Image (tube, helix red, strand yellow):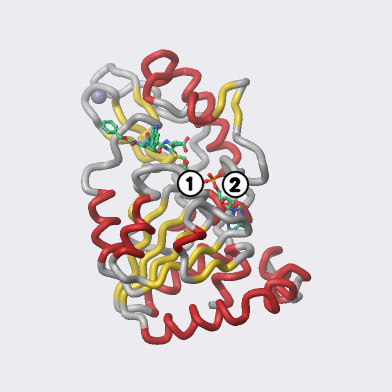
Amino acid sequence: MKEEYSFWCRGSPNVEAFREQDMSEIQMVKDALATAKRVAALTGAGISAESGVPTFRGGGGTAVWKGMRFDQISSSEMVKADLPAVWEWFDYRRGVLRECEPNPAHFAIAKWQEQFESLALVTQNIDGLHRAAGSRDVIEVHGNIHRSRCISCGALYQMDRDTVPHNPDVCGCGSKVRPDVVLFGEMLPEGAYEKGAEAAASCDVFFTIGTSALVYPAAMLPEIAKRSGALLVEVNPEETPLTAICDASLRGKAGEILPSL
Ligand code: BV8
Ligand code: ZN
């Protein structure tokens, strides 16, 4: 049996603690889901934490790479200034991802696709773990680390997760390729934000899962959902700037909370 499942089935201390703490809130969310037709979710790095993928913030730290904060190395300036350094950072992360599998949180959301009339999944993550867990039509607002793009003609190259380092390094047209990921200072993929905003504005329940809600415009989506009358549910061991406007804040790990919903 997979490690994380035995952990969950054993009734780990976290799960016990979590049960007393949130039963009223979790019951409210369960009741809402019993009648919900349209559900939407925004996920961030925290949903992949139990798969072994390091998060960017939280736990008091900020990811750094060779002395640079990750928002400096993951920036449009660095692609122009030092593309090899950007690839070194992304190939390192792709190497880490080779060992990472979807966790019960990813599988729970993939199951929701069958349970509700409509399920819109917007992810800030570039790790591809939602798709690997079986989710379809994932709106990847920050791109995907297993795809690269020519800096001149825009040709896309899909890599499998074992292609580390990235390949090809040069496009057929002769120009360099870069990660097909939205870096700081760059626009989101055409239509991605709009699709997410439309889902947020028309859902009955909106989940913000495993995100510190600091990066825009993705962090706007839960606010749009709230303003449009959705029940706003946060799943995160820590408080975030969204906590104050949430109808329910389920304090715990996504891999334990989502399957229990
Ligand atoms: C744009 C890809 C516009 C790269 C990423 C000042 C004010 C407001 C905005 C700005 C500003 N200055 C600049 C901006 C814009 C900027 C921005 O928002 N900056 C922020 C930091 C202030 N945004 C942009 O640049 C965006 N583009 O705005 O373009 C524009 C307009 C015109 C013309 C040109 C451009 C592009 C943003 C996208 C950047 N790319 N990623 C890469 O991955 O390297 S963002 C990066 O942060 C990741 O994608 C990540 O997903 C995202 C958000 O982080 P989180 O997912 O939330 O992860 P984090 O570690 O922060 O938090 C984890 C959470 O999980 C924690 O809360 C933790 O408690 C919780 N957790 C931990 N374990 C668990 C858990 N939860 C549940 N279960 C667990 N087990
Ligand atoms: Zn090209």
Q: Nearer the viewer, residue 86 or 34?
A: 34
Query: Relative to residue 16, is residue 216 drawn left or right?
Result: left
Residue that numbered label 2 is attached to: 53
Inter-mark Cα distance, 1 to 2:
8 Å
**SS type, badge 2:** loop
Q: Nearer the viewer, residue 82 or 199?
A: 199
Residue 129 on image: x %, y %: 49, 54
Based on the displayed image, in which of its 4 quarters is residue 256 positioned?
Answer: bottom right
Name the amino acid, label 1. Asp
Query: Relative to residue 125, is residue 99 drawn left or right?
Result: right
Q: Nearer the viewer, residue 155 or 37?
A: 37
- Residue occupying image coordinates x 44% and y 44%: 126
Q: Nearer the viewer, residue 23 or 191?
A: 23
Residue 149 on image: x %, y %: 31, 31
Name the amino acid, label 2. Val
Q: Quadrant of the N terminus?
A: bottom right
Residue 96 on image: x %, y %: 60, 40
Residue contact at pointers 1 and 2, CB within 8 angstroms: yes
- Residue occupying image coordinates x 76% and y 71%: 12
- Residue 187, above or below 126: above
Residue that numbered label 1 is attached to: 127
Based on the displayed image, in which of its 4 quarters is residue 173 positioned?
Answer: top left
Give the number of callouts. 2
